[in-house]
Image (cartoon, rainbow, N blue to C red):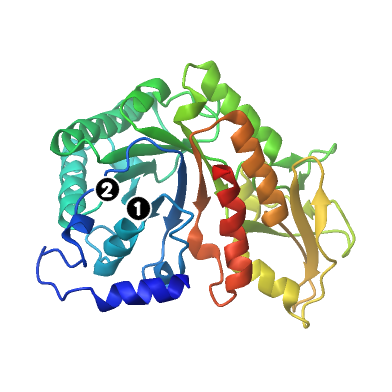
């Protein structure tokens, strides 16, 4: 039914040239006047057609991370606005460029120009490397966000400006958290790639990508510095982390990671590889790949399983499925946060719509 409605919308789209409105109704080419509401933000990294399968009835905002001046599908804004969904730009700021005044000014102007040209609704800023930020560069980052906020709001108050920040303000004290919050409609908290486990012997162990206790602690750390929970959108991963184990078997709980040079147990990305939720399901269904079945981690409230690759190496994948995701959504409701977000919708396998929409439906419990 959802695909039929999108198809009907396409039939009525007009051929366009330049910046002319190409939507069935010209009001769809204006910034959405949605007002204050709770949020379900879906991040999008793939412009090749996945957006045709997004659940526009669940999400409230789609944040696209396509390259600046990328040829955005013209129907995307029409579909989004027709369904009451904001379409915003998710922009990555390069850390090393922050001291460059020309870069900062040109970035802001490019963002504003692109948003107006593409009939979008705002911007979400994030740093290329969010955990490496000097105090001086933090001030430059705040300047970018505040100047963007002032300029966009002066053009149209309905534009939405926000920033992605580490999962807890005590992770990096360099950020001007409260000032950034003041110049943002809300803050988007990155509650992924935050877990780490270390054995009693100091060895790295595979662990959850997004453990619930750390999510809740990070949230409370934000509120303790005066940022209300109603200004926080918690972002959950629709991807898992794949670790190669140096010990164990299919039923092992602990997966020991070889302590190679450059590994940092506290940086979970350095000891694992990201794998999409869609790819995880394919591994579990593949009869040629031996796996030990899904297990429950009672501490992190997430799931994991072990499998052997075709070279005979043992792996352990930690991820969220609808069961564990529901607990995260319930936690977010209990904390009375502003909203939830998915990183990212393109991690679903849209050839498997049943399992893909299970993830959307689980997130939608936040609105109930």
Q: Which mark is residue 84?
A: 1
Q: Is residue 1 visible?
A: yes
**Mark 2 closeness class: few <14, some 14–19, many ≥20 residues within 10 Å:** many
The answer to whether 96 appears left or right of 147 in the picture is right
Residue occupying the point 21% across, 66% down: 23
Residue 95, by quadrant, is top left
Q: Is residue 71 above or below residue 32?
A: below
Q: Are marks 1 and 2 in contact (CB under 8 Å)?
A: yes
Query: Residue 367 at what x, y percent from top left?
Result: 54, 44
Task: Specify the quadrant that holds the C terminus.
Answer: top right
Residue 361, by quadrant, is bottom right
Q: Is residue 147 above or below residue 313?
A: above
Residue 105, by quadrant, is top left
Q: Is residue 51 above or below residue 134?
A: below
Residue toward you, 367 or 213 = 367
Q: Which mark is residue 32?
A: 2
**Mark 1 closeness class: few <14, some 14–19, many ≥20 residues within 10 Å:** some
Q: Secondary structure at mark 2?
A: loop
The answer to whether 337 appears left or right of 156 in the picture is right
Residue occupying the point 57% across, 29% down: 219
Residue toward you, 156 or 166 = 156
């Amino acid at each position: 039914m959802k695909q039929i409605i999108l198809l009907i919308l396409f039939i009525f789209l007009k051929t366009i040239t330049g910046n002319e409105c190409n939507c069935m109704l010209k009001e769809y080419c204006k910034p959405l006047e949605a007002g204050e509401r709770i949020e379900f933000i879906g991040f999008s990294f793939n412009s090749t057609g996945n957006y045709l399968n997004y659940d526009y009835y669940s999400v409230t905002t789609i944040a696209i991370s396509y390259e600046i001046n990328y040829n955005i599908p013209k129907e995307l804004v029409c579909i989004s606005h027709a369904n009451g969904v904001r379409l915003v730009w998710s922009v990555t700021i390069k850390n090393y460029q922050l001291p460059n005044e020309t870069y900062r000014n040109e970035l802001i102007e490019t963002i504003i120009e692109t948003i107006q040209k593409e009939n979008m609704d705002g911007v979400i800023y994030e740093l290329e490397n969010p955990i490496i930020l000097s105090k001086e560069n933090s001030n430059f980052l705040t300047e970018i966000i505040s100047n963007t906020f002032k300029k966009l709001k002066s053009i149209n108050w309905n534009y939405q400006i926000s920033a992605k920040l580490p999962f807890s303000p005590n992770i990096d004290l360099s950020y001007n958290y409260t000032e950034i919050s003041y110049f943002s409609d809300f803050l988007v908290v990155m509650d992924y790639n935050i877990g780490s486990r270390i054995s009693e012997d100091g060895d790295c162990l595979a662990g959850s990508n997004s453990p619930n206790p750390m999510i809740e602690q990070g949230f409370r750390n934000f509120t303790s510095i005066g940022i209300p929970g109603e200004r926080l959108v918690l972002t959950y991963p629709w991807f898992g982390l794949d670790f190669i184990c140096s010990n164990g078997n299919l039923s092992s709980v602990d997966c020991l990671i070889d302590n190679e040079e450059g590994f940092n147990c506290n940086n979970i990305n350095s000891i694992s590889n990201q794998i999409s939720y869609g790819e995880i399901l394919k591994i579990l269904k593949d009869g040629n790949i031996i796996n030990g079945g899904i297990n429950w981690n009672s501490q992190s409230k997430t799931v994991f399983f072990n499998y052997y690759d075709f070279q005979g190496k043992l792996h352990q994948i930690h991820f969220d499925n609808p069961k564990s995701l529901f607990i995260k959504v319930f936690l977010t409701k209990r904390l009375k946060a502003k909203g939830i977000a998915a990183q990212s919708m393109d991690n679903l396998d849209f050839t498997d719509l049943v399992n893909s929409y299970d993830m959307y439906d689980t997130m939608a419990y936040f609105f109930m």
